[in-house]
Amino acid sequence: MARGALPDAELIEVLLASALHGLSHYARQRELAQPASRRLAFREVGLPIGLRALASMRDGFGDGPGSTRPQVKALLAQLVPHLALGASIESFWLDPVHRQPGTWIDHRDINEVMLATALLPDGFVILAPVA
């Protein structure tokens, strides 16, 4: 935000509110209680990537668009508890036992790329300003 990659403060607020609504709903589901054989890592690991972006937004919040909007700060604060969900998903897929079922092996290439991106997301979640 401080770099101008998301120049529309109203859009940032809408996106954060939507993320909060979606995460609240997802957290109530029991999908993450399923065994690895019933889960698709590449879909699931997208969430920790997005949550890492949230952490970057929270940590880098300052003079960028939206910094004068108290709703943005409030939404970021409400989203912080969901960061643990991303860590839980990463931890699950880092366990070699969970990478043995066919659901991992059949999509191994994309699963590995997504997991690597979740673990080292800076090249993906830190956006350059729009020219």
Image: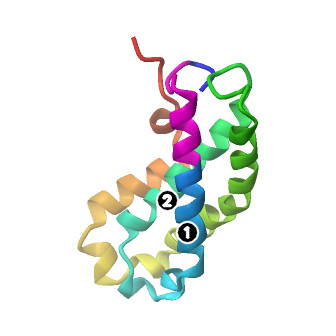
Q: Residues within 10 Å of mark 1 (few under 14, many from 20)?
A: some
Q: Label 2, on which residue?
A: 47
Q: CA distance from mark 1 to mark 2?
A: 8 Å
Furthest-top residue in this view: 131
**From the viewer's perspective, is 88 left or right of 106?**
right
The structure residue drawn at horizontal position 47% and vertical position 88%, both measured from the top left corner, is: 34
Relative to 42, 120 lies left or right: right
Task: Give SS at disc 1.
Answer: helix
**Can you say which quadrant of the picture contains the N terminus?**
top right
Q: How many numbered marks, from 0 up? A: 2
Q: Amino acid at mark 1?
A: Ile
Along the line of sight, which residue is nearer the eye, 93 or 42? 42
Q: Which residues are magenta?
A: 4-16
Is the residue 66 above or below the residue 119 in the image? above
Res 109 quadrant in image: bottom left
- Report the residue marked by disc 1: 89
Are circles 1 and 2 on residues that touch, CB within 8 Å?
yes
Q: Residues within 10 Å of mark 2 (few under 14, many from 20)?
A: some
| Mark 1 vs 2, N-terminal side | 2
Q: Position of residue 45 (x, y in %)?
A: 45, 62
Occupied quadrant, residue 99: bottom left
- Identity of the residue drawn at 58% across and 29% down: 9
Whether residue 79 is situated above or below residue 98 in the rendered picture: above
| Residue depicted at 57% across the width and 62% down the height | 21
